[in-house]
Image (cartoon, rainbow, N blue to C red):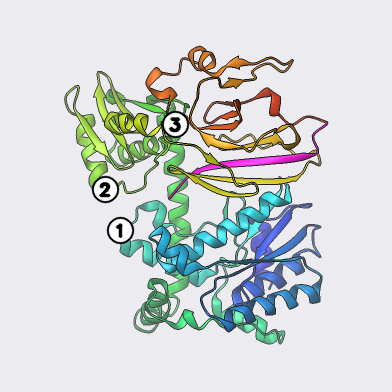
Amino acid sequence: MRQVQNFIREQKMIMPGDFVIAGVSGGADSVCLFFELLAYQKEIPFSMEVVHIEHGIRGQDSLADANYVENLCKEYGVPFHLVSCDIKKMAQESSLTVEEAGRKARYQAFEQAAKKSGRSNCKIAVAHNLDDQAETILMNLARGSGLRGLGGIRPVRENIIRPLLNTRRSEIEAALRGRQITWRTDETNRQTEYTRNRIRLEILPLLAQGVNGQAASHIAQAGLRLQEAEDYIQSQVQKLAERYVHYEEKAEPEVFLEREGFCRQEHLMQEYLIRFCLEKMIAGQKDVSRRHIGALLELAAGQNGKSLNLPGGIRAVNKNEFLVFEKNRSIRKKGNEAAKCRGENLQIPGVTGWRDLRITADVFSYEKQIIPQKKCTKWFDYDTINHRLEIRTRQAGDTLSVHAEGGTKPLKRYMIDEKILRERRDEIPLIADGSHILWVVGYRISEAYKVTERTKKILQIQIDKEN
């Protein structure tokens, strides 16, 4: 479809030489995405592979979906990767809905495929369409989302692209029928026990019939305008933050907000500055409600020494001219006691859980790829590792290589030199090879394990907070 090709081009979704991982479920949207990407390859050169997630929910129908997508890829010579998951089990273990667990599993599979490719120019293409956009905006509106949520889905977000986001579902199905292309139908999409399905099957049709036949398109267009408004506000918040927010990136950050300048701002900008500060904290904004934001606004204008405990183990306290966001001291004390717990051997490759962290390890060949400069993702020379790696806190005898020419320093001395507070030293996660520390998480990696010209295999470790 011309509009899809134009949308890809306008949004600069794919550049020459990119590596695109397409999520193809077998439904009409993803099958259309598959063929539109094939068509776009005729305009610019890029490579493509397909990832299909088999959710383990619909029995033989689910397996038939996977078989359909695999045969489609074989027919057109596109590499195919199958990932099987037990979504219901994941949902139960993570206290998520089936919808949420399915979404989490899909994006984990896409990101794993991207990491294994070792490509720095990897894009993940998913098949959200205009109707999905309208559904998302209505769902966020009903849940009380702020401006960001009301903007809905972004056409491009980091390395995720959505080429069909300006195309109606009816247009997609009509285009496939016109080309005599079949697709698979997921009967669970007709079950109104799922929130999104109720909006799709009941609410949007009612709006189209009783209010305006173009309701979905108009809602999606409003979302684009709200995205523009959000982007502008964020640009202004960034300017204010440069003046009034002070932040040091450490294992346990503290954020300082100048109260006088903050209190002079409009109410809306105050809210956004508060959220900016919370985003700097490790716990982020999870479970922070408008009630908490209101209480923080009152706190900032209050007396020196006043404080407020927030979700995620964060405390906000007035310290003279600053409103300071820091780790809750009572939780920090518990953390020091818990620091004596044993470490956990890393699954390589695989995923390891430790405390509230999720450690993902992958091994792949080094072909002079660009080393990612990310705080939570590090590359190591796999061949220099002598023991089974573990994640733990510090122990007596730990050492760290801090000089490229060789030689080690006791970890205790390194922490003193870095002016890491004594009460924090037992909380910092470490990736350890015996008594040799590969990575002081939040600070630095060892010189002895860095990637060099002689490196043959890469060990990639990514550390995330569990949701």
| Amino acid on which the number 1 mark rests in the picture | Gly
Task: State which quarter of the image contains the N terminus.
Answer: bottom right
First in residue order: circle 3 vs circle 2: 3
Point out the tag, 3 or 1, that comes first from the N-terminus: 1
Disc 1 and disc 2 in contact, CB within 8 angstroms: yes
Q: Does 310 sit left or right of 157 as displayed?
A: left
Across and down, in percent, residue 121 comes to 71, 48
Please identify the residue farthest to the left as the structure is shown: 303
Q: Which mark is residue 144?
A: 1
Label 2 residue SS: helix
Q: Which residue is mark 2?
A: 290
Q: Which residue is mark 3?
A: 239
Q: Residues within 10 Å of mark 1 (few under 14, many from 20)?
A: few
The answer to whether residue 103 is above or below residue 184 is above
Q: Residue at x 48, y 66 (%)?
A: 133
Quadrant of residue 331 within the rendered picture: top left
Q: Is residue 431 left or right of residue 32?
A: left
- Residues at circles 3 and 2 in contact by the CB criterion of under 8 Å: no
Secondary element under disc 1, as helix, strand or loop, is loop
Image position of 119 with respect to 449: above or below: below
Disc 3/disc 1 C-alpha distance (Å): 27 Å
Left or right of 249: which side holds 45? right
Query: x, y percentage for residue 289?
Result: 28, 48
Q: Which residue is painted at 41% across and 18% down in the image?
A: 421
**Tag 3's secondary structure?**
helix
Q: Is residue 179 magenta?
A: no
**CB contact under 8 Å: marks 3 and 1:** no
